[in-house]
Image (cartoon, grey):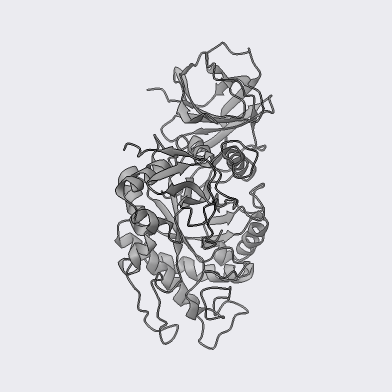
Amino acid sequence: MNGKLFRLRLDRPARFLAPAAGIALAAPLALVASGGAAQASAGAPMGLAARDGGQAPGVVIDGATRYQRIAGFGASEAFGQAETVMNDPAAVQQQVLSLLYSPTSGAGLTILRNEISADPGTTIEPTAPSSPGAAPAYLSLAAVDQDQGQLWFAQQIKADYGVTDVFADAWSAPAFMKTNDSQDNGGTLCGVPGATCASGDWRQAYANYLAQYAKDYAAAGDPLSYVGPENEANIGPGYDSMIMNPAQTANFMEFLGPTLLRSGLRTQAECCATEGWDYAQQYAAAIEADPVANFWTPLFTSHGYTAPPDSPLAGWTKPVWETEWSTFQAWDPAWDDSTTASGFSWAQNIYNGLTASNLNAFLYWWGSTTPSENGDNEGLVEIQGSTVATSGRLWAFANYSRFVRPGAIRIGATSVNGNLEVTAFRNLNGSVAVVALNTATTAQTATFSLRDTGAFGLAATPYLTDASHDTAAQPGIGVRGGSFTATLPARSLVTYVIPARP
């Protein structure tokens, strides 16, 4: 949520891993069926022998029922997290990057969220020009330590894992552009309705500043997919923050969109990184009510703190990403300990976001952190000296992100067994990924029937996550007559991957 609440916590027991071996978003499909939240029957230790259909309660995977297009899954390294990794020994760097972005041994994340800093020493515009229309004196990203390590981080995941979907949000405009003359404690952008400043109207200058940040990344070979002007703009805490009500936000989007277009970049505007789904609806409605702002806002973003993503945004027909969410208790790596930080809880959060809100992307807050940088559950992994501790949350993401790749379409998934929460996806390569969460305390067996999926593999490969397995491949299950039968362990998450016909 903020990234600056530095507090030291004692760690709970964690598992450690040695160094691992080494998109632009398409428009979403129109919803053609209701009832996005599909369920399925699941359960028991992995006796994964194939059986003929009809022997267990059925799960139907229906490729003819199509929902949203998936952009991906990701996290942020904002507020110095990327710089920490950049300055770590090479072995630690390799562990962190592999655990977060490797599609074979880690979570396989495909999106990185940046912070556009307004702090002295890390902003690209530390000095106020003489007026809003005067030429600014921008610093290079190299002059602000590779954008707090974020540029270095983006370059590494592109080179090592082909990840190119990087976007950025500003928590605040530079201090001199705001009513309170500070990058912290709220304040509003000078020039939006209701915010008059003696220094003048800084709306266009702020749009130029955001475009310059995008230009810097493009020049470095890592063009941004989107930039956004604000973060949780309903609050004004004592770190980078800026208060913008829904109408003021919509007004500024009229400036940002055209400015990015004139820049010649592929980068587009997004909005609004709201604090939760309760605020999301207010800001989305304001943008929809402004035809110009609506035209220039192809993507809506929100967080899950004050309210989770539990319903579609009324009236919004364009893509929606959940771009920040975490918990703040002491570091907890557990898969299933009945807390909101557990991997099991986050598997449910992802499932609910994809099915109840038709999200196109789902992001955690930080990918990596350290005990001295909060030491809580704001990260998927925690750097602890020369080793990196993983969390159950990391593997919950892995069961989705490794196998549901950018461009995949969520397809129909229904079940007669309410113990299973099931989603299914058809990837661009024709493969199908079925993700099943067994919420029961006992094993569950189900027959999965594949209809109109285009996947004709002779076997489904299960990948199991539970208290003893971290997205671990299991023996293949034969697919006969378009179906397979599997037993899922209690309180487990299993992804079944069925390849397309060769």
> Taking 283 as reference, is 358 above or below it?
above
Question: Is residue 25 something that shows in the picture?
Answer: yes
Quadrant of image for the C terminus: top left
Q: Height in image: 345 above or below 130?
A: above
Seen in the picture, residue 459 relative to 304 is either above or below; the reply is: above
In front: 111, or 241?
A: 241
Q: Nearer the viewer, residue 499 or 1?
A: 1
Q: Left of 232 or right of it: where is 207?
A: left
Residue at position x 54%, y 79% in the image: 190
Q: Is residue 26 visible?
A: no
**Residue 297: percent from left, percent from top:** 53, 60
Q: Position of residue 254 (x, y in %)?
A: 52, 69
Say whether residue 220 is left or right of residue 400.
left
Residue reaching furthest front?
Answer: 10
Q: Where the N terminus falls, by quadrant?
A: bottom right
Q: Residue at x 56, y 80 (%)?
A: 180
The image quarter in which residue 132 lies? bottom left
Where residue 338 appears, as percent x and y from the top left, is 65, 39
**What residue appears at the point 44 percent right and 86 percent down from the top-left corner?**
131
Position of residue 289 measured from the top left corner of the image (x, y, whole percent): 64, 64
Say left or right for 468 vs 39. left
The quarter holding residue 435 reads top right
Q: Residue at x 58, y 73 (%)?
A: 186
- Is residue 460 shown above or below 78? above
Tag count? 0
